[in-house]
Amino acid sequence: MAKIKIKKADVWIDMTPMSDVMVLLLTFFMLTSTFVKQEPVKVNTPGSVSEIKVPETNVLNILVGNDGKIFMSMDKTTDTQTALSSMADQFGISLSAAQQKAFLDDPMWGVPMQKLQAYLSLDKNTRPAELKNFGIPTDSVQGKTGDAAMSEFQLWVKAAHEANPDAKIAIKADEKTPYKTVKKIMSELQDMSENRYYLITQYKKAED
């Protein structure tokens, strides 16, 4: 007796709604994600039990490498542009449109003002490696506008706050950064009456 073959029914699932959901989720994450800027030096932050979060906007970031070199960045390009213009005026430096664009394209800055023009004239692929060799000076200088006894570091902080008075200061130092360097930074901030700032650390449990 011949076997009766049961015809298998094709299973068809409409994946269109699922595709729409995936596109919406992808769009959402792209619009809400905060991209981390490339840092000129690798920093391993010390551990802390604090869970205070650093703001993601209106921030003046101060990065300190394990060798004590200082770099800065701001999250808003317009603020960075304003701060740069202020510093260039104080030091009597004229920057071309291409040099200004190069400054804004770099994720962080940290070159002494007297060497800024030459640095910004370098190829964009060369600048990241060169930046590691510099760092914002904390030695006292005389600004063109009469800011006597203020270091370039302090002048940058002042210019940044003039560009954005709401900017919060966040300091990210390596766990091996010399203590005297961190103390110097805090001392210079206190001399400017900048007594409120965030210290970026890695979270660790209290029992650690």
Image (cartoon, grey):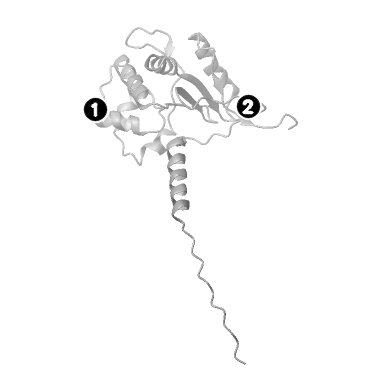
Q: Position of residue 114 (x, y in %)?
A: 34, 22
- Give the residue furthest to the right: 207
Q: Nearer the viewer, residue 174 or 34?
A: 34
Q: Quadrant of the N terminus?
A: bottom right
Extreme-bottom residue of the structure? 1
- Label 1: which residue? 96
Task: Please give left or right for residue 181 compared with residue 143 in the image.
Answer: right
Q: CA distance from mark 1 to mark 2?
A: 43 Å
The residue indicated by pointer 2 is 51
Tag 1's secondary structure? loop
Say what secondary structure mark 2 lies in: loop
Residue 70 pos. (x, y %): 47, 26
Q: Where residue 153 sits in the image (x, y, percent)? A: 44, 18
Local packing at callout 2 (Cα closer than 10 Å; few below 14, some 14-19, many 20+) is: few
Q: Give the amino acid at mark 1.
A: Ser
- Residue 62 at what x, y percent from top left? 48, 24
Residue at 29% x, 16% y is: 89
Q: Earlier in the sequence, mark 1 or mark 2?
A: 2
Residue 49, located in which quarter of the rendered image?
A: top right
Dot 1, how many residues are within 10 Å of its Cα: few (below 14), some (14-19), or many (20+)? Answer: few
Res. 133 image quadrant:
top left
Compared with 190, 117 (above or below) is: below
- Residue located at (40% from left, 7% from top): 148
Tell me if label 1 and label 2 are in contact, CB under 8 Å: no
Q: Quadrant of the C terminus?
A: top right
Instruction: Judge whether 19 appears above or below 163 on screen.
Output: below
